[in-house]
Amino acid sequence: MPTVLRRFFLTLLLFLLTVSPNVLASDESDNSGSPIDVMGKVLDHDYFEMFNQKIYLPRIFYVDGSVYLYANTQSALDSGEFVRSEEEGFIVRSDGTPVFIDFSITSKLVWFWIGVLLTFLITWIAAKRYKNGVGSKTEPKGTLHNLFEVLFVFVRDDIAKEYIPGEKYRKYVNYLFSVFMAISFMNLFGLLPWGVSATASLTVTATLAAITFVITQVSGTKEYWGHIFMFPGVPPLVRVILTPVEIIGMFTKPFALAIRLFANMLSGKIMIVSILGLIFIFTDMFGATLGVTSGIVWVALTALLYILKAFIALLQAYIFTLLSAVFIGLAAEEHAHEDHESSVATATEVQI
């Protein structure tokens, strides 16, 4: 197996092992009294839907040191071992003990797996073609192969090489490209009528950000850690203030990565469903004639939002990958203390 493919496979395996299912999988519930259930379209579910066909997913509960496995939610309830809480609608054990960890497979987790699987397959096929000389000894052949090379070269040259110093960028290209492709797929899935953006789950975005955080800290040089804890040239009393700020900053960066991606993808889906749902709301309030007539406006506006959301989906994948490269590059950068003081002095002179 080629080195690039092996590293890519290990990166994807890290995704699969690290990303755990949501702590609580959403159950299907009725929405009586409302013409459209907006939040029901963006929340996680205990079923996988495609072409209006629902496949209910396994439920896995960990309670009091025991693991319970059921084919679906209804099987868990029919067993008599679990019931639905009357107050919040969550599933709890029949004796009232709450589920400690819910490892259930959910709709967003399935879409996450599909995004990762597509990323792996495309990369595996491209690596096989390069190994056979197509693209390495000759020009790439086919639209997909050319598109793959354009994206890979873009991530390598315009993101990794640009923001990670020296030749160090080479060992991070595989991770950054994997993240870019997987997030792009997961974002674009939300454009499908029955699709779900896995990145609209904070569990997914937080895990991706956590992987970037770990890689960043592992890549940190002596200068990086020195400027967090020691601050060369800074009075000791000032260090007492700056050190906690820098330590907090280490964690706010991945937090911002996770929240930015999560909020953008969640809000985009809510906006599309809300605007398209105005057809049903107007029909419910003013009758079928006005509802259908106004639908022309809402459908046209939704079409424009779909184009905007497709752009945002790719843009957010780029931003996440770019910021990951920036954070890794700052940690991996090596520079002498004198160079740092010189750069600070130069910046001060420019400001003056």
Image (cartoon, rainbow, N blue to C red):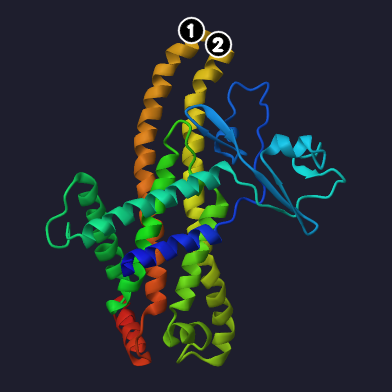
Q: Residue flagged by tag 1: what amino acid is it?
A: Thr
| Label 2 packing within 10 angstroms: few (<14), some (14-19), many (20+) | few
Inspect this view and state whether residue 316 appears: no
325 or 63: nearer the viewer: 63
Please provide percent x and percent y for residue 237.
58, 89
In-front residue for pair 277/207: 207
The Cα atoms of the two marked residues, 2 and 1, are separated by 8 Å
Q: Which numbered disc covers residue 264?
A: none
The residue where tag 1 is placed is: 289
Q: Are marks 2 and 1 in contact (CB under 8 Å)?
A: yes
Q: Which residue lies furthest to the right in this view?
A: 95
- Viewed as shown, does residue 267 lie left or right of 142? right
Q: Relative to the observer, which residue lies in front, 104 or 312?
A: 104
Q: Residue at x 37, y 66 (%)?
A: 6
Badge 1 local density, few (<14 within 10 Å), some, or many (20+)? Answer: few
Please give the residue where the numbered disc 2 appears in the rendered image. 286
SS for dot 1: helix
Q: Is residue 158 above or below residue 148?
A: below
| Type of amino acid under label 2 | Phe
- Would residue 9 appear left or right of 139 to someone viewing this image? right
Residue 63 showing in the rendered view: yes
Residue at image point 22% right, 50% down: 145
* Front residue of this view, candidates 260 and 12: 12
| Residue 82 x %, y % | 79, 42
On screen, residue 177 versus residue 267, left or right, reads: left
Residue drawn 40% across and 42% down?
188
